[in-house]
Image (cartoon, rainbow, N blue to C red):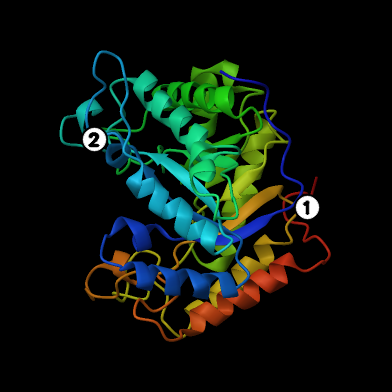
Amino acid sequence: MGPPAQAAPATESFGTSVNRLFNDGTFSAEQIDAQLRALQRTGAGVARSDAIWGSSEPAAPADGVHHYDWSFDDSIAGALAAHDLLWLPIIDYSAPWDESIPGQDHSPPASVGDYAQFAGAFAARYGPGGSFWSEHPNLTARPVTTYEIWNEPDGPGFWLPAPDPGRYSDLYLTARAAITAVQPGARVIVGGLTHPAGFLPEMLAARPQLAGHIDGVAIHPYGNPLTVLAKVRDARRTLVSLGLGSVPLYVTEFGWTTEPVGALDYAPADVRPGYVRSSMTALGHLDCGLAAAILYTWVTPESDPGNLEDWYGIHPPRGGSDPSTAAFAAGVRAASAPGRRVRLCSAGT
């Protein structure tokens, strides 16, 4: 289970996902460098991307001994540190040899313990004083401080065959214990939820010992800007109703695709910049106990007009400019600037 929950961070962080930049395997080292330099110029401080268990441990442990190949994760850690970006890793998904549904990496691991072993080994390598930093003294260390456990475990697309609050809670608690065993000051957060008002109470009902051992809850409040704020408010109210009012919220995904017309989370290209700027600005000044606001996503291929996943990116994949990039930078500046708190979550209380 690990130590009691950490206190909320003193300041809120802002950034974007960079998952497609690394996961797709189509960007060259030079292109990755150029993309991250552009992201750094916006003032972003955090970059969210997957720490894929199957890439790091493609084969089952032999005689109980785990053998990790850190080359994929090293490339991410090195590239982000070189641009003064803090990695928020998502510890996911099931390794091919440990899938509870063979052939489905979005099914939960058959062995919670093996997943937790990976999470702890990852923290030992990339956390403060980790082996990656000692092996790369030329880099200014930017150790991982916060770990997100899985992605959207309350959605059927990411937890097959169907969400299971009790099983996810076991995964979270076991992984948190493994991470904090090697990094006592780590913050381990519940993976981005799409329906926290339903899933969080079910988690606590299934595993009451979670109370007092949750360092943060990530949420994915997709929708228009007003919907984004309404979902943040509802998530905070849910935490308060569970006696978890001091647990910080991490908005680890929100954003809009510009293709195809009418797709889920669609916004026209001339409308999206306003959405990006206004939402980021607002998320920086709410009274809702936010620890981070992370836009989805920095760059996507922009190749298939019929695939909405190819058009969430706010920066062109081949360089150049996009109004959404400038809007994001303006939003980060406004969110980071001192200002009066917007009474959203405390209104009417």
Q: Is label 2 or label 1 in front?
A: 2
Determine the residue positioned at 56% across, 81% down: 326
**Crowding near the residue tagged with mark 2, few <14, some 14–19, many ≥20 C-alpha atoms within 10 Å:** some
- Residue 257 percent location from the top left of the image: 38, 70
Provide the secondary structure element on which disc 2 rests: loop
Note whether 241 is above or below 166 in the view shown: below
Residue 267, numbered label: none
Provide the secondary structure element on which disc 1 rests: loop
Note whether 54 is above or below 87 in the view shown: above
Note whether 29 is above or below 86 in the view shown: below
Residue placed most toward the observer, 143 or 306: 143
Residue placed most toward the observer, 172 or 97: 97
- Residue 202 percent location from the top left of the image: 49, 26
Image quadrant where one finds the C terminus? top right
The kind of residue on which mark 1 rests is Ala
Determine the residue positioned at 62% across, 67% down: 280
Image quadrant where one finds the N terminus? top right
Q: Is residue 52 left or right of residue 275?
A: left
Note whether 48 is above or below 144 in the view shown: below
Is residue 130 visible in the rendered structure shown here?
A: yes
- Residue 27 percent location from the top left of the image: 30, 67
Q: Is residue 99 left or right of residue 224?
A: left
Kindly report the distance in space between the C-alpha atoms of the residues bearing marks 2 and 1.
50 Å
**Crowding near the residue tagged with mark 1, few <14, some 14–19, many ≥20 C-alpha atoms within 10 Å:** few
Q: In this view, which residue lies farthest toward the top?
A: 63
Residue placed most toward the observer, 340 or 225: 340
Q: Is residue 70 left or right of residue 334?
A: left
N-term mark: 2 or 1: 2
Q: Which residue is mark 1?
A: 347
The kind of residue on which mark 2 rests is Pro
Q: Which residue is mark 2?
A: 58
Q: Is residue 315 left or right of residue 306?
A: right
